[in-house]
Amino acid sequence: MKTIHRWMLTGCLAALTATATAQAQPLDITSPVPESNSTTPTPLPSLSELVARALSYDSGLQSQRLDSQSVAQEVPMAQAGLRPRLDATAAYRYTDADNIYTKNPGDYPDEVYDDRVAGKTRDTSWELRMTQPLFSLERWRRVGKAHAQMDAATLKVAVAERDLAVKVVETYLDAYQASRKLGLLIAQRESLVLQQRQAQRAYDLGIGDRINLLESRSRLDQAVADQTSAENDLANALSDLERLSGTALSFDPALIDTPEKLDIAPEARPLEIWLAQTQDNVQVRLAAEQQRVAQIDTDVRGATRYPELNLVVGYSDVDSNDALRTSNDLTASIEMNLPIYQGGYTSASIRQGELTAMAGTVAVENEQRLAQQEVRKRLLSMQGDLRQIEALQRSVESGSLFLQAAIRGESLGLRDLVDVLDARSSLYDLRIRFIETLCLYLKDRTYLAAAVGQLDTSALTDVAAILARVEHTSSNRAG
């Protein structure tokens, strides 16, 4: 008897629902919501081209490159210290002297001494002086330090390029996620609008309760809020992409479907191999290069204790009103300079360099640990993401079957319209979660590639290929 009563109640509810629907404009909810964004999605902007544009456009990176070029000039500056140095000097000198000549003019009656006896002389002179270092350990080591500084500056640019590429990929995925989420939310909102109308009609006819009506209104309001949030996220992501690449992009909201099997293979390489590859992390390489610069700088400081040996060749020409002072001289000499005591400066300088080198060694170890921790975290997160993707794919498939069953039940009078709309709304929620999890996986994958120094065109192509497979599935089903 209970079964018969339940069937009768269901039949009455279906009849009253049909009557209420007939009184208003008919609404077809048994097929997907006809949204303009449910057509074939527009092609996605090329991720590789976008990263390439950002690498050539970003002003911060351009500044870093100019700084690197500036540091590279340390090499020829250091090499100049090993080459000959040529100096030219010119002078005019007026002298008013009081000496043995001026005090004893009688002893120098010859007119050759007249100007000298007068004590007033005017000299014009010029000199060329060439200095060629023969041995300078400090200068030789400065050349090695300059090369190390240039390599470190190049790695700084590489770090900036990697960070910029990661930022572009992350923002690109944010824009993709927001646009596809927005497309699903628009369709979900339309479904909830129908559900709320149906609940209102049932309540007006006295066959529905106020709780269901309030619940439908609450879900609709939440959908509107979620749609607004997605619109803001999309606008912010597009603004960031334009700032990074200098290109205004368009991610049109699209109602995409969920692939039945995305078939993303998990990482097969063991953790030890991934950890070993962190040696190629540009941040680790930069720390190692900076440590090498500090070590070479310590050697440069220690080399100041050694003597310097220089060959000096000079030519001078002096023209004076005192004939005895007029001369043309050519000189050649070998000069040695050995610092003996500078108040303890040299010892303190060497100790400072040693401490800086020790700090650099610790910094290398820290960067290595950070890179290895990043690899562990991203690998673990990727494994969880893949499991969630597989589970969500099964959930979407089950949700689609449930929606079909609800539609069939509604046509047979076993389900009402609210059940159909509720099943459709739940399916949209699952598809939104799938897109969010997929983008999270792709971000983890990007960070993993960056952690092991493998964020290249191939890695970007793999990310774009996975998104293209999702888009291709939606295009085929839309067609």
Image (spheres, grey):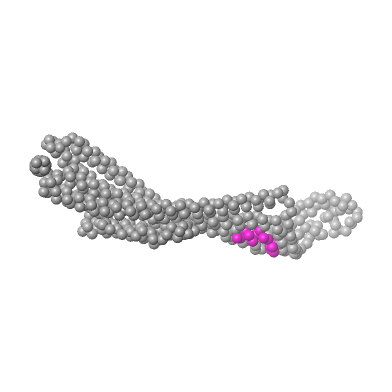
Q: Left or right: where does residue 126 sit relative to residue 228?
A: right
Looking at the image, residue 314 sits to the left or right of residue 10; the answer is: right
Q: How many labels does the image show?
A: 0
Instruction: Report the span colored magenta.
Output: 126-144
Q: Where is residue 280 in the image (x, y as percent from the top left)?
A: 48, 59
In-front residue for pair 130/301: 301
Q: Which residue is drawn at 39% across and 61% down?
A: 268
Tell whether 304 sits left or right of 99.
Answer: left
Looking at the rendering, which quadrant does residue 382 occupy? Answer: bottom left
Q: Which residue is drawn at 11% across and 48% down?
A: 412
Residue placed at 24% from the left, 58% from the top? 475
Quarter holding the N terminus? top left
Q: Is 339 located above or below residue 201 in the figure?
A: below
Q: Which of 185 and 125 is in front in this view?
A: 185
Q: Where is residue 122 in the image (x, y as percent from the top left)?
A: 77, 54
Find residue 55 and report its image quarter. Answer: bottom left
| Residue at the extreme front of the image, as rendered | 1
Quarter of the picture holding the C terminus: bottom left
Q: Which residue lies furthest to the right in this view?
A: 106
Position of residue 27 measured from the top left corner of the image (x, y, whole percent): 14, 46
Left or right: 22 in relation to 342: left
